[in-house]
Image (cartoon, rainbow, N blue to C red):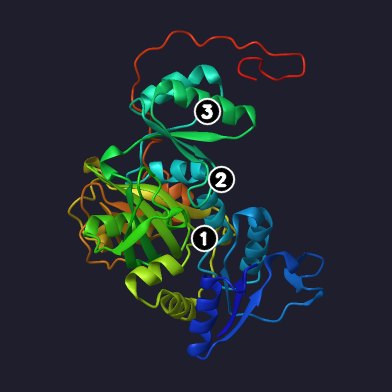
Amino acid sequence: MELAILSRAPTSYSTRRLVTAAEERGHQVKVLNTLRFAIDLSGDEPDMQYRGKPLPDYDAVLPRIGASVTFFGMAVVRQFEQMDVYTPTTAAGIANSRDKLRSIQILSRHDIGIPATTFVRDRADVLPAIERVGGAPVVIKLLEGTQGIGVILAPDTKVAEAVIETLQSTRQNVLIQRFVAESKGRDIRAFVIGDRVVAAMRRTAQGDEFRSNVHRGGTTQVVELDEEYQRVAVQSAQIMGLKVAGVDMLESDAGPRVMEVNSSPGLEGIETATDLDIAGAIVDYVANQVSFPELDVRQRLSVSAAYGVAEVHIGEASGLVGMELAQSGLRERDITVLTVTRGTKVVPNPSGKRILEADDRLLCFGKLEEMRDLVPARRRRRARPSLDPLPHDEVSEDGDEQAGS
């Protein structure tokens, strides 16, 4: 395998370990500076230059994109994807994980526990936002902070208001989250590769520090995760679009609560704590996947006129409950079932003998018109208490709202 590692820190622990693991397995590996690429869209096919010269062919690329070069780094990874070079860390996955608000928004739609979170911009909305997450103390987070930087514990409402107002005055966007007190300054880092957790450690903050990051002096210990924690970790990484990820979870009384999904997790802490060859497991996984570059299914299938992908919900009134998939009549309607989701379990390429149950969800490819009456009605939000009429915000002559500006 010809492997490229995108990194601006070739001497860092993680990069050196990946290079060593690849070489030990007989692969050809190069460390390439992310910022030295030139994206070439002038020819008939997507291409790139590296240090002013044509880029050699690579079978796979492992991005180690630092937060300071996220935008350009994503563009480079995206170009590799257009060139059909396999990567376990897609540009979309990096984008999803780097923005804390974006990642929480995506996870909130799925069966993934997250700390109660809110995001507001107007100072008049700050107090109601704090109350919605359960009141002080609250955790205030910068959207693009890393390694615990930009994470503040506000012990009371007045402090929270002052911190948020100060950060917003410097044009910083912040999240307000419930403080999970029972986690007691501890969290879980689960290292996900493909569809399994290969290692996990518990990180514990030191002294009065509530942030457990190793970079902030936190200690680590190996931990065996139960089935629920493993499911949440793997599903979170997959939802983000990442095949290699570090998933950080709090141990709450209600179960795992995902704080963050890291697209470039460091290897030193997890390998030191577990004494496992995580770098080797990453390289092995990539080597097994190089023939299957990332595809955007909707883009590829949309070239078929009147065909597309849709999720079909099997309701009690559908007439399909208790029926074998082969007897459902879907194939005769030119509808192919790609997966069946039952609860949190996904069955790929289901056989015709699979019995359909109520609340099964079928991911289908077929004629859109044939699937129209099978697609569930658009989900409506839960009924909310009636509110007073919305106030009319004043708008200045340049089009900016004056309130909270």
Q: Residue at x 57, y 62 (%)?
A: 300
Left or right: where does residue 118 sit relative to residue 343?
right
Q: Quadrant of the N terminus?
A: bottom right
Image position of 157 with respect to 213: above or below: above
Q: Quadrant of the C terminus?
A: top right
Q: Residue at x 49, y 20 (%)?
A: 125
Q: Quadrant of residue 19?
A: bottom right
Left or right: where does residue 92 sit relative to residue 226?
right
Amino acid beneath label 3: Ile
Q: Which residue is mark 1?
A: 297
Could you tell me how far apart the alpha carbons at marks 2 and 3 are, in whole angstroms?
Answer: 15 Å
Q: Nearer the viewer, mark 2 or mark 3?
A: 3
Amino acid beneath label 1: Val
Q: Which residue is mark 3?
A: 164
Residue 144 badge? 2
* Earlier residue among tags 3 and 1: 3
The percent coordinates of residue 239 (x first, y second) are 42, 54
Image position of 212 with respect to 155: above or below: below
Q: Are marks 3 and 1 in contact (CB under 8 Å)?
A: no
Q: Nearer the viewer, residue 127 or 386?
A: 127
